[in-house]
Amino acid sequence: MTTTRRRENHQDGSLTAMKLRKEKQSYDFDATTEQNLVDFFELTSSIFFCCFLFSGVPLSTQWGQQGYFYPIQVAQFGLSHYSKNLTERPPRVTMYEDVEGHDLSSWSNPSPNGEIKIVTSEELDSHVIEFKTTGDTSPSSSSVWSHSLDTKSDFVIAFDLKLLGNASITIVAESEEQGRIISLVYTTDDDGFVIGNRKVTYGLGPVTQWRRITRALQIDYRKAMASLSTLKYKLTRKFILQRLLRIELRGHGFIDNIEIGTSLHMYHFYDAADWLVHHQDERGGWPIMVERILDDKMSLSPGWYSSMAQGQAMSVLTRAYIKSRRKKYIKAALHAARLFQIPSAQGGVLARFMDKYTWYEEYPTSPGSFVLNGFIYSMIGLYDVLSVADVEESRESRRLYDEGMVSLKAMLLLFDMGTGTLYDLRHLALGKAPNVARWDYHATHISQLQLLASIDPDPIFKETVARWIGYTKGKRARHN
């Protein structure tokens, strides 16, 4: 067992490169611009994510209690972890098992019918552990291979896993609730999470091929327990793990590289990047499979696209490409620009304001809603692509970005109320009162313009930022 502190610089999110990579990448964005992006993505990280399922990315219940994958939150999840990896103290990471020493003495099994051995994985081109037990795979089964963990401060675990048939991985921990012993069980089911007697069972989905599993154990425990509690119980009880005791293996499978750390941000980042690659459709987008009602006269049926989702996905994918140099990431980022060319009425995200100015719609309604923050997020994504991709490959992204910037500079002051900002311009189409931005959205507008001011010298951004910051301090525009 070895413990180190390291900045995570994993170069590849693919399952064929699971061994830790410690080489530092030389390529990076312009330092000032990247720091602004880091600060900006930290701002987006406060969004509440429901829970993690078999994909390793958040499942949203924002507009549907049944749960669905919302690409904006998936991208923000990835960007948040990318930012934290750059800004937080390097995590303390303990390697509990990598079989390089060919020593299995730390594993125990009270049943005489189990088997554990070191084998060679052709897929990973390395040694891994193969385990077998008899009987069922529930935590009550005595046929189990277990390894002591005994950590009181680190609660993010990662391991490489391949399971054959019905198998499970269990983390046994002690909670702060009177020292209660609980089990977090990860199976091959697709059921999300199921809560039983002192155990929470999470479905990882099929793991018949090698996968890197990363779990934030505190979140897994607290979110599952809070989901069944009454409001009063949520407010008065704390669901906190205070110690990890052991990891248990049941069934038949393979495991390697068991790590526990204070954080493993880049693993989470690549979970998001790989989800975006695998779920991008032929149009280059990530359809949102839930109804969105903006207004009694504005709604979107399931399957709609969002320019904000496209843009933030581009930001994730370009960073994954920079870190890994894997072509699949930049290819997906370039493909994502396609929907910016398709009018909203035809299932894309392109709108025209007053039949003159190009606008990329966060919510592609008819009539247009012209949401400011979503448009700027899409512009940042286009900027990331044209800054990283080959000049010829990114020619279309450059055109889209340039057209969008012309529109933003012409329309920006339409969102200025003299006391705050507007969230969108729907009132112009619907003939009703303006949709005023909440102060948190006003703060987002300020952060976005500060970022744009760092990449575009036009004084409109700096001047507008200064005025909008003034609104937060009680200043108002002059009146006659």
Image (spheres, rainbow, N blue to C red):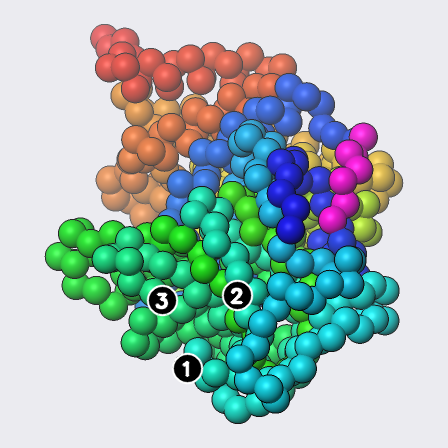
The one of 162 and 451 positioned closer to us in this rendering: 162
Relative side of 205 to 208, left or right: left
Residue 414 rendering spot, x and y as whole percentages: 41, 28
Q: Would you say residue 311 is visible in this rendering?
A: no
Residue 73 rendering spot, x and y as whole percentages: 48, 52
- Mark 3, residue position: 182
Q: Secondary structure at mark 2?
A: strand
Q: Amino acid at mark 1?
A: Ser
25 versus 106 height, above or below: above
366 versus 21 height, above or below: below
Q: Is residue 363 magenta?
A: no
Nearer-N-terminus badge (3/1):
1
Classified by dominant secondary structure, the portion drawn in magenta counts as loop
Q: How many marks?
A: 3
Q: Secondary structure at mark 1?
A: loop
- Mark 1, residue position: 140
